[in-house]
Amino acid sequence: MQLYRPVGLRELELIAASGWRAFPPRLPEQPIFYPVLNREYAEQIARNWNTKDAFSGWAGFITAFEVDDQFASRYPVQIAGSRHVHQELWVPAEELDEFNQHILGPISAIAAFYGPQWQGERDPATNLPAHLAPAQG
C-alpha cells in the first residue's frame, strides 16, 4: 500500500537519522500515527499547516513509502472530516515500531514547502534542507 506522511522539519531529521527506514516514536501527547492515503491530502497538511507552525520548523514535507498490504489491512481506512479525499490510517503509537518493520524500501521525501519564517539553506536539486539533501540522494 502506498502511503504518505506530512511531516515538519524535526520529524524529517529523525527519519533521515534512521537511514530513511523508520518514523520516530510519537510524543506522549500523540497517541496515534496518521499516515494518509493520497498525496493531495498530505500536501494540504504540509503546505497549509506545517509551514505556519513553529514546532514544525516553519516547513512541511511530504514523505512517501510503501507498507506491506497484508499488514496495512489491519488498520481500517478512516475519513477525516467530510471530504472523501481525507483518508488516513490510525496506527496506535505503541504499534509504530511494528509498523516501521513493515515498510518496504526507504521512505522518500517527495515535496517540500517553506513558510516565510523558515530560515536555512535549501539544496537546489532536491529543495530539501541542505543538511538533509545528500542523505536522500
Image (cartoon, rainbow, N blue to C red):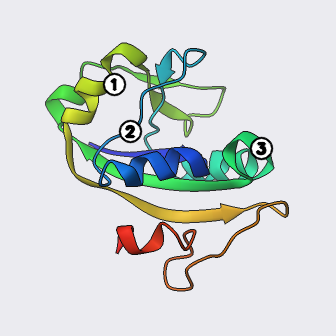
Image check: 46 left or right of 92?
Answer: right
Q: Mark 3: which amino acid?
A: Asp
Q: Residue furthest bottom?
A: 124
| Distance in Å between CA atoms under marks 3 and 2 | 20 Å
Residue displayed at 63% across by 34% down? 83
According to the picture, the residue beneath numbered tag 2 turns out to be 23
Circle 2 SS class = loop
According to the picture, the residue beneath numbered tag 3 turns out to be 53
Disc 3 to disc 2: CB gap under 8 Å: no
Snapshot quadrant of residue 61:
bottom right
Disc 1 to disc 2: CB gap under 8 Å: yes
Classify 29 as above or below 50. Answer: above
Report whether residue 38 is seen: no
| Residue 118 percent across, percent down from the top left | 77, 62
Residue displayed at 27% across by 29% down? 99
| Residue 68 percent across, percent down from the top left | 17, 38
Q: Tag 2: Cα neighbours inside 10 Å, few (<14), some, or many (≥20)?
A: many
Q: Mark 2: which amino acid?
A: Phe
Classify 120 as above or below 38. Answer: below
Q: Mark 1: which amino acid?
A: Leu
Mark 1 or mark 2: which comes first in sequence? 2
Circle 1 SS class = helix
Residue displayed at 38% across by 39% down? 23
